[in-house]
Image: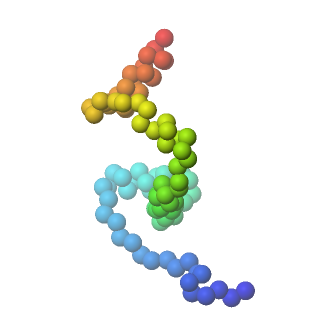
Amino acid sequence: MLRTINEVDMNSKLTLKLNDRTIKRAKKYAERNRQSLSSLVENYFKIISENEELNEIEISPNVLELSGIIDLPENFDLKNEYKKHLEEKFSQ
């Protein structure tokens, strides 16, 4: 079966500037998982672009009805409140 150029995956070079520590950690992660840094970055790009497509999915009326049901103050710190919840839950 012959494939046209449009059907062939073409690779392009990409140069990124990242923090040295981040690069070292990413290399260790890639090595542990037997992957190249390129494949990690490519997979990440695929995930975020797929998530963007998922955001375009129509939300059902039932879900829309539930959204906004809780009114939180603007300065509400969700991470901090969740941390407090976990500390209380597991400190007993």
Residue 75 pos. (x, y %):
26, 32
In the rendered image of this protein, does residue 52 appear above or below residue 77?
below
Residue 21 pos. (x, y %):
33, 51
Q: Nearer the viewer, residue 4 or 91?
A: 4
Q: Nearer the viewer, residue 79 or 70?
A: 70
Quadrant placement of the N terminus: bottom right
Q: Nearer the viewer, residue 85 or 9?
A: 85
Furthest residue in direction right, as rendered: 1
Q: Residue at x 45, y 77 (%)?
A: 12
Q: Residue at x 39, y 54 (%)?
A: 24
Q: For this view, does 61 lie left or right of residue 78?
A: right
Q: Residue at x 48, y 17 (%)?
A: 89
Q: Residue at x 56, y 84 (%)?
A: 6
Residue 34 pos. (x, y %):
57, 57
Q: For this view, does 60 lie left or right of residue 18?
A: right
Tell me if residue 47 can be seen.
no
Q: For this view, does 10 lie left or right of residue 85?
A: right
Q: Nearer the viewer, residue 80 or 65?
A: 65
Residue 4 pos. (x, y %):
61, 88
Tell me if residue 69 can be seen.
yes
Colouring style: rainbow
Q: Number of numbered discs present?
A: 0
Furthest residue in direction top, as rendered: 92
